[in-house]
Image (cartoon, helix red, strand yellow):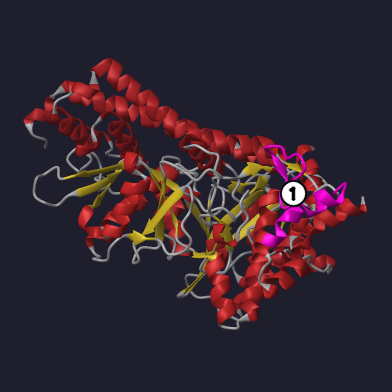
Amino acid sequence: MFPNRLTDSRAFDIAKALLDGFDRHYSLFRETSAQAKQRFEHLDWHGQQRAQRERIEFYDRRVTEAATRLQSEFNAGQLAVDTWQQVKLHYIGLLTGHQQPELAETFFNSVTTRILHHSYFHNDFIFVRPAVSTEYIECDDKDRPTYRAYYPELATWAQVWQSIVESFGLTVPFEDLPRDIGHVVDALQTYMGDFRPRANFQIQVLTSLFFRNKGAYLVGKVINGFQETPIALPILHNGRGQLIIDTVLYREDELLMLFSYARAYFMVDMEVPSAYVQFLRSLMPRKPRAELYSALGLQKQGKNSFYRDFLYHLRHSTDKFRIAPGIKGMVMLVFDLPSFPFVFKVIKDYYPPQKDTTRELIKSKYLLVKSHDRVGRMADTLEYSNVAFPRDRFEDELVAEIQKFCPSLLEISDRDGDGHAELILSHVYIERRMIPLNIYLQDATAEGDTAAVERAVIEYGNAIKDLVAANIFPGDMLWKNFGVTRNGKVVFYDYDEIEYITDCNFRRVPTPRNEEEEMSGEIWYAVGPKDVFPETFGPFLLGNPAVRDVFMKHHADLLDAAFWQVHKERIQGGHVHDVFPYDPARRFSRRRAGAPLPAHPLDERASELTAD
């Protein structure tokens, strides 16, 4: 089947060592993901957060281990070109029958690109294109397929849903499972209307729960005739040692919010991840595969899939990269391709005096966001090294900007000598493109759209309060550092000044002791490096009277040091806030209680604390 040269045992041994490294990685990945169920049952929220951070580090550790082994055992950096080609072909052969072939290909890329020069980064040596199909891969465990199908009658619909929930074997009892199932069935029947069950009427449910933060999510769909309804049931603790089904999500947009790129990765025990991605795409066909892989905690596969999508887009477009519209950043140079819904961010080589930072510090802030709970308010960032772009696709103004501000990261090369130069950036962040909030508010104000202004300002305050709940102080809270997504959510995306709330010292501005201090144009009181004075935010944020009126009506507490301090102390006391990836008005418990909803769940927490 293969040419004779593939009998080279050295190349085979290297391929086998690479696959051994991947198999060790995925075994550890599955182990910590499977343990999420026990952590959920034991309310071990800090353990869940710790496991989330550590799991992100697993991949790079295993890549380093594998690269070190290849160097020490095989002197991999000195191997001939044809040997590396043989290694790849042997590796493809080893993936026959493998259950995570796409992840193993990505692992191969990660290890070999640690060793090889970027001139090798094409399909002869790495997997620029996938070589092994992921279609119809089956689980080895026949008793635990990717998903199960149930065939209810309308009269037994509730009983079937209850048996589905019970099949996950959660060891914590439910407060009242039949009651919650009744709410689920009522909501679905209201949404689906009076319908006649067709021959294919069924419920399909993924066999692993999805764990994130303080919740577990059952994910599946209802099929009836040509209609498919996506389903997600959030399962939470009620604070009294019991579980509840908090609501039912059944619209594609609701699941898109649940699986948003601005949220932390799920923990899911998957034997065949490609099958999970295929199932989830049937629920959310607009969601790119890359984002689904990332949402499942397989962010390196998400990066690989994204980059393939990017290369494909480049081949089928002709527009040019440009300096991104909006206010230019002091530490980041941002550019985009108008036809592609992402922005590219490069750390500058030098910064203005008021920015006391370094490249390594900025990178550490982005890593913090990657490993932290993003609560739907901080965009996930894809980080790449040695990214090659066609030089002729860059506007000259952008190239000049990069040469001025980022010369240490730039290389322009005509490797093949054919006049088609490449522009290579040694380090790049890539994020979803959003409308900068300052531009959104300017446009809405110019158009007289007061409703849009009000929604955006309320969302801005809610975004900051969600960040507070996640122990994040954004640092620079200017409107330009937030963006508006397609569905109107406000998301923070400028991370170079973020800090943990618990590391900040929230203070009131001292009362002037004399007229000289009162009239001084300079700060006359001592300010520590982590001191924050919330009452000083107003002059920078509230120059527009329309914006100020809305902000003061809904979020005036953000200008009060006491608000920040009370939540800092609560977090220091070990409390983990609930941040729901859906509208709190949808919660079954609130419907039962008939309680009015606060403008933001954190406002309710603050009022409880004030009352205490």
Callout 1: helix, strand or loop? loop
Relative to the observer, which residue lies in front, 598 or 30?
Answer: 598
Look at 11% across and 44% down and name the residue there.
Answer: 416
Look at 66% across and 62% down and name the residue there.
Answer: 541
Asked if residue 287 lies left or right of residue 507, the reply is left
Task: Write down the region rendered in magenta.
Answer: 512-539
User: Is residue 187 visible to us here?
Assistant: yes
Asked if residue 15 lies left or right of residue 35, the reply is left
The 10 Å Cα crowd at callout 1, few under 14, some 14 to 19, many 20 or more, is some
The relative height of residue 66 versus residue 154 in the rendered view (above or below) is: above
Expressed as whole percent of the image width and height from the top left, the position of residue 128 reads 25, 46
The N terminus, quarter of image: top left
Which residue corresponds to mark 1?
A: 533
User: Is residue 203 visible to us here?
Assistant: no
Expressed as whole percent of the image width and height from the top left, the position of residue 169 reads 65, 44
Asked if residue 350 lies left or right of residue 441, the reply is left
